[in-house]
Image: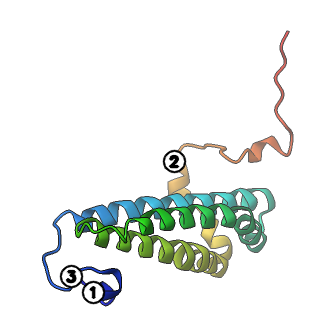
Amino acid sequence: MGWLADLVGIPATGPVISFMPIILIAVLFGLAMDYEVFLVSRMHEEYAGSGDPQRAITRGFRASARVVAAAALIMVAVFASFVPDDDATLKPIAFALAVGVLLDAFLIRMTLVPAVLALTGHGAWWLPRWLDRVLPNLDVEGARLGGRVPTLVVE
């Protein structure tokens, strides 16, 4: 099964369960996108307000990194809690998910993504003109409010 098979208690020889790669890819991709949305949407909100990519990355990361770290650590703990189980089917899936979430959240989402965004600067937030015409013009961050808080008038 791999280098850490003895440590985890997985038999070194045996078949790979046919649905295991599908489950691993689906769950890890879903969690990765969730963490990515938390981080990058907050950074984009800052960029929409300030127009400064470095400030947006720094402030957006500070605002959302704790949430992503907490969510990742919770998921790692949940998946790792299944590793001591004697079920030979569940154990490798749980171990792979725990390691995968740990690596993705802290190495990719919290290190590599902000670094790439910082290197690309304004280009990270650039939208091609042809795509801008095709996509609907949604103001998700509330940039058009100009700092005003919307009020409801009831008569």
Question: Would residue 76 appear left or right of 155 to someone viewing this image?
Answer: left
Residue 128, can we see it? Answer: no
Tag 2: amino acid: Leu
Q: Mark 1 belongs to which amino acid?
A: Gly
Of residues 41 and 81, which is closer to you in this image? 81
Using residue 71 as the reference point, say whether residue 46 is left or right of it. Answer: right
Residue at point 16% right, 66% down?
18
Label whose residue precedes the other's in the sequence (1 or 3): 1
Q: Which residue is mark 2?
A: 135
- For the N terminus, give its image quadrant: bottom left
Callout 1 touching callout 3 (CB < 8 Å) = no
Circle on res. 11? 3
Residue at image position (62%, 80%) is: 115
Pair 2/1: label in front: 1
Can residue 48 be seen here? The reply is yes
CB contact under 8 Å: marks 2 and 1: no
Task: Decide which of tag 3 and tag 2 comes sooner along the chain.
Answer: 3
Q: Where residue 150 sits: x, y (%)? A: 82, 32
* Above/below status of 146 relative to 36: above
Mark found first going from the N terminus, 2 or 1: 1
Q: Amino acid at mark 3?
A: Pro
**Is disc 2 placed on a helix, strand or loop?**
loop
Kindly state the secondary structure of the residue where label 1 is placed.
loop
**What x and y, as percent, mark residue 149?**
84, 37
Q: Determine the residue located farthest toward the left in the rendered image.
A: 15
* Residue at (39, 69) in percent of width and height: 97
What residue appears at the point 43 percent right and 71 percent down from the top-left corner?
A: 98
How crowded pointer 3 is (Cα within 10 Å; few <14, some 14-19, many 20+) is rated as few
Q: Is residue 150 above or below residue 145?
A: above
| 31 relative to 111 in the view: left or right | left
